[in-house]
Amino acid sequence: MRGLFRRTPLEYPTGPLEGHKLAFPMLSADGTTAGFSGVTLGRAHVYRTVDDAVCAHGCRHACPSRWCDCGFYCFHTADDARELACAPEHQGAILLEVAVSGRFRRYELGLRYARQRVRTIRMRACRCGARVAVLADTGSGQHGWRRLEPVCLRCAGARPVLSAQRFAELAELTLLPDDVAAGPLTTPDDAAGFAEHPDPHGTEADDLIGDPVAAAGAVAVLTAEMALLQARLDEMARQLGRATARLDALEGRDLPAAEPGSEPDR
Ligand SMILES: [Zn+2]
Ligand SMILES: [Zn+2]
């Protein structure tokens, strides 16, 4: 966040304030309530759809305090939130559009404020790049809350899952269509001519997976795993070579002239 929230001159808004941010989707331990966990300063705190900021440092002052960095944060534009989303540690976070109220401080790129209502959420692509199908339990979380992550069915595996729509209902907000990467990136489904040039192994892959996008992700994963296995095999071959050479040296200890140019021990 270094430099992102430089102060601008004091001003007074005339209309409702809106913002965009990233958050990890959370589900209460009893499964009845949805919430969010911040990706930066507020990581340790879970907030609900409508909530008031509390000081992240445990102080009792009202947020946002001039002398503290606490409070909710948001960007003015969704694009800035998307840029933050590119950081690998933010994989699994979803995009939120929020309405800001209460005390606030305005900065160049966004706001720091006391109260917010999450209006809408957007899923971001699965970490494998495929389209999101469900929210899966990550196995981590905080006291009373499980952290979920948007994933494709393949990456969900055998984990407990929740549909994005069900999550939105629990959170009492609107689920918008999935976020799509800007610029020249497209999903294979949308790429022109993709259908006319099916993968030669398409039939087999379709039987296996049934989803060309997931299949492409699976191929990428398999390729990476094969490269890893190859590297391990190379390392094992090197170790075997060293062990064989050592064995030869030990067995050859009593043989004269085992090492050319050196006298064997007697
Ligand atoms: Zn504070
Ligand atoms: Zn995936």
Image (cartoon, rainbow, N blue to C red):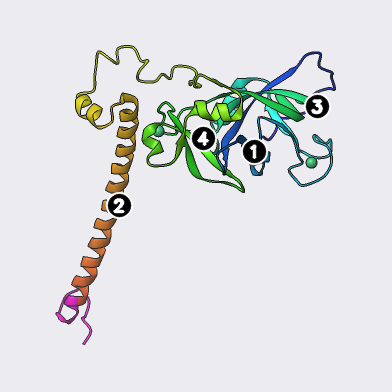
Q: Foreground: 262 or 155? A: 155
| Helix, strand or loop at mark 3 | strand
Label annotation for residue 40: 1
Q: Nearer the viewer, residue 264 or 95?
A: 95
Q: Does mark 2 have its CB less than 8 Å from ligand 2?
A: no
Q: Which residue is mark 2?
A: 232
Q: Which residues are magenta?
A: 251-266
Q: CA distance from mark 1 to mark 4?
A: 14 Å
Q: Amino acid at mark 2?
A: Arg
The answer to which of 224 and 259 lies nearer the viewer is 224
Q: Amino acid at mark 1?
A: Thr
Q: Amino acid at mark 4?
A: Gly
Q: From this viewpoint, is residue 4 visible? A: no
N-terminal label among 1 and 4: 1
**What distance separates the C-alpha of mark 4 from that of mark 2?**
30 Å
Q: Considering the numbered disc 1 on the image, is that residue within a helix, a strand or a loop? A: loop
Image quadrant occupied by the C terminus: bottom left
Report the Cα–Cα distance between label 4 and label 3.
29 Å
The quadrant of the image that shows the N terminus is: top right
Identify the element where label 4 is drawn.
Answer: loop
Which mark is in front, 3 or 2?
Answer: 3
Cα distance, mark 1 to mark 3?
A: 21 Å
Quadrant of the image occupied by residue 204: top left
